[in-house]
Amino acid sequence: MHNESASAAEVVEEKVLEAISRYGMIEKGGNVVVALSGGADSVALLCCLNGIKDKLDFSLSACHVNHNLRGEESDRDQKYAESLCGRLGIPISVFSVDVSGTVGKHQSIEERARALRYEAFSSEAERLGARVATAHNSCDNAETVILNMLRGTGLKGLCGIPPVRDYLIRPLIFCTRDEIERYCAEKGVDFVTDKTNFSTAYTRNKIRLELLPKALEINPSLYGGISRMTSSLSEDSVYLENAAKERLEDARLEDFVYDSGKLACLPRPLLTRAVSLMLRERDIEPTAIKINGFEEIILSGQG
């Protein structure tokens, strides 16, 4: 429970500390790099972590990726990020990437931008031996869950955005966008706004701007409810993944060779996950079509 008379800054800081503690996001003496776009979420994240870094004993730096997609706006965002870090005395690395010139076949501009962005984060994490903090919040989490539901998803898709994945951490995962914007106003820090956030040409924006406001009329506590659901389902998902790993090892005969008889006896939820693990072992993307195909071979006793 959070104190209702607390200021926006206190609420955000309390929720960030809760997320860090619950998911073991930051080690004492560790390095954290904030993925700083210059928007409200990443600015609040940088300022909040800067305020608690001495208490938790970690080093802080920032990383900005200029996608060069919005002309002067892209350069404005970069300058703002550099200027904010300069004012706070926080080191920043800037990556300039060519999204439109390297977009692949069957790949959208957004997918390519994301891939290049995470390549930059990964290289910073490796260079500094750091964890990279992205500014995903509970509203982003709700949007992701709904987007996955609309596309038709399994349990994993209902788990939303993981608070920790590999070198990535999401300290704002319990905070709403409204709390974050009030935090910035209270702290007197400005931020840049990406105009494309208001275009309903993008599916995610359509969910954020049109669908979620209607859902909030039905349940004003929607974001908290979805956060509780994703947290609970994530525990179920981890349990099933671990059980599938154990059964897969039990069926292993040699490298990449398995006893199909043992696999065929598995309950469907474990078989699906075991097949997915088998595919990943060979660096094959475990799509639904591939998983279903492998399951049919195993269950028919042909393979």
Image (cartoon, rainbow, N blue to C red):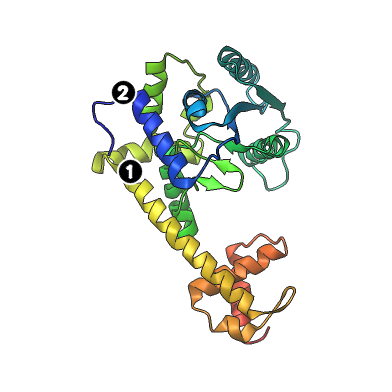
One can see residue 105 in this view: yes
| Residue indicated by mark 1 | 224
Instruction: Give the CA separation, mark 1 to mark 2.
Output: 19 Å
Kindly identify the residue that appears in the image at 67 percent across and 62 percent down: 280
In this picture, is 235 found above or below 197?
below
Decide which of 150, 221 is in the foreground and name it: 221
Crowding at mark 2 (Cα within 10 Å: few <14, some 14-19, many 20+): some
Task: Indicate the amino acid at tag 1.
Answer: Gly
* Residue 277 position in % (x across, y down): 62, 66
Q: From the viewer's perspective, is 215 left or right of 118?
A: left
State the residue position of label 2: 7
Q: Is residue 42 visible?
A: no
Task: Give, as a three-letter code, the residue at label 2.
Answer: Ser
Q: Quadrant of the N terminus?
A: top left
Q: Is residue 284 left or right of residue 194?
A: right
Horizontal and vertical percent position of residue 206: 44, 38
Mark 1 or 2, which is nearer the eye?
Answer: 2
Between residues 180 and 3, which one lies in front from this camera angle? 3
Q: What residue is at 57 percent from the left and 83 percent from the top?
A: 264
Q: Would you identify the image quadrant in which residue 184 lies?
A: top left
